[in-house]
Amino acid sequence: MVQQTRQTGPGQRAEQPRTPSGGGSLELSEYLRAIVRGWWIVLVCAVAGLGAAAIVTENMQPQYQSTVRFLVVSPPATGQSALQSDELSRGRIATYAALVKNDLFVERILRDSGVPVDGAQALDAISASGDRDTLLLTVVVTMPDASDAVAAASAIAKNFGPAVNELEEGRRPEGSSQTVLTVVSGPTPEDAPVAPRVGLNLGLGLLLGVALGIGIAVGRRLMDHSLRTPEQVEAATGLPLLARIPHASAARSFEKLLQRRSDSLVDEAGRRLRTNVDHLSQSQHLHSVTVTSATAGEGKTTAALLLAKAWAESGHTVLLLEADLRHPELALELGLAKTTGLSNVLSGQLPLDKVIQRTAFEGLHTIGAGTVPLQPTELLSSKQTPLVLAALKERYSRIVVDATALQPLSDGALMGSLTDGVVVVVRHERVTRQMLALALDNLRAVDSRILGVALNALPDRFAEAHRRGAPRTRRAHRAETVDPGRVRGWPEPGEAARHDDGGSGPGREKDRGSGGSAADDPDGAALPPPRRG
């Protein structure tokens, strides 16, 4: 992590570098987003937990209970008050609750009731508890068969009192009477099973499944070390953030990106990228910029097209050069007529003027990658590449190079070393800190000038729309926006046909002759003349 400390004057405290969130811990909002993003995991685990609870409940053996309650009374002995007798009963009630599970008494119950269970099962089936305040002793018998539970409880009600008196026969002082255990309720017959409790089991299964799903969703987020927030990217690279390109469906179509949409937040991100690049290049004039990314699929071509379009809007003559010779797609996506391009020029098959094509956006030309060569890296590293770039700089005030990704290929770093600056595109949640660091090391190894980072496919909470607020209405925003094409004097589509004054403004290339240094493309549109000075 690159940390920067601001220089302070005398008497000022140094500002401590801030640690970005998202490293080892998450904020509450990130936990909630992780759960929302993993809703399907939570749903699957909830259904699985509910199904497991249903299966377990179905396979559980039903249990029936029968309850009998005794009132424990110790008649007062000679010279003993009623209060002392009650205290004696309270002291004995816990002992009586333990005696119910005595082995000898359980055998006596089994003989009397005829329940077909052994002693160990009977001990597990009987439970007893005493209430010292009410002097009630409650005995509960739980068995798989309802009639067996009632029979065992009846045997306890019949034999427990005499069994207690037999045990106390030798310990009772003279003049005292026997303890009386009176049955006050039961044995209760239970027609419905007390277990399994279907509703409780299903609720617990559902709750455990949801908890497991939330744990998995949050765990996946904690183990995902991809860069998400602008603060994380700035801290990982130590580079300025040049633009926040929002996630939008329009960015998936290159033809839609070339349309004039002054109220588009994607286009506004391209203008922000242009402004920041121009600001960084004030001390050192910049003609060519390479746009690349750490890995494939991060939207580098989209960012390159937005930057080229924004420069064309501001009045520059711009060329978008596709240097990805392995996977050419620009000509097809833009609907251009020719599939030849840079590879054909570098290999000596075609001259440079034959591969330059006009786009649907005024002031923006392009050169596609061309035919896929057998050795793209060797072709780009040939002596012809710097010569081609130098020739293009004579014609265009801005050149945007759409290069290959930096990992695992070296083509992007090679093109970065041949241009005046490099913009690295980072897609939201696509690359890790380590992958991005390796990509930047590749650029620094060839002495490329890294201008900054452009974040792509950002959700609304990170994009400029969330920070500034979206335009009030499309109509109001258009009314407040000045069309750069009208400022430069470019005619709107179809307007050029109504003018016959033979002017030579920026929108009159088709009226120029073929003389001078301008070269004609096969479509009949004149290319920009060599730049003077």
Image (cartoon, rainbow, N blue to C red):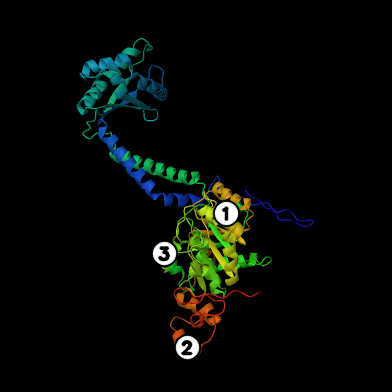
Q: Secondary structure at mark 2?
A: loop
Pointer 3 with pointer 1, Cβ within 8 A: no
Q: Which mark is residue 519?
A: none
Q: Which mark is residue 499?
A: 2
Tell me if mark 1 has few (under 14), some (14-19) or many (20+) residues whose alpha carbon lies within 10 angstroms of its own. Answer: many
Q: Secondary structure at mark 1?
A: helix
Relative to residue 48, is residue 391 depicted above or below? below
What x and y, as percent, mark residue 467? 54, 64
Tell me the kind of residue under disc 3.
Answer: Leu
- Determine the image quadrant of residue 487: bottom right
Pointer 3 with pointer 2, Cβ within 8 A: no
What x and y, as percent, mark residue 464? 53, 64
Q: Looking at this view, is 159 or 266 the one in front?
A: 266
Relative to residue 9, is residue 489 depicted above or below? below
- Determine the image quadrant of residue 173: top left
Q: Looking at this view, is 14 or 489 the one in front?
A: 489
Question: Is 283 situated left or right of 515 in this image?
Answer: right
Reading the image, the residue beneath label 1 is 413
Reading the image, the residue beneath label 3 is 332
Q: Residue at x 46, y 84 (%)?
A: 496
What x and y, as percent, mark residue 242? 58, 62
Does residue 442 appear in the picture of this structure? yes
Closer to the chain start, of discs 2 and 1, is 1
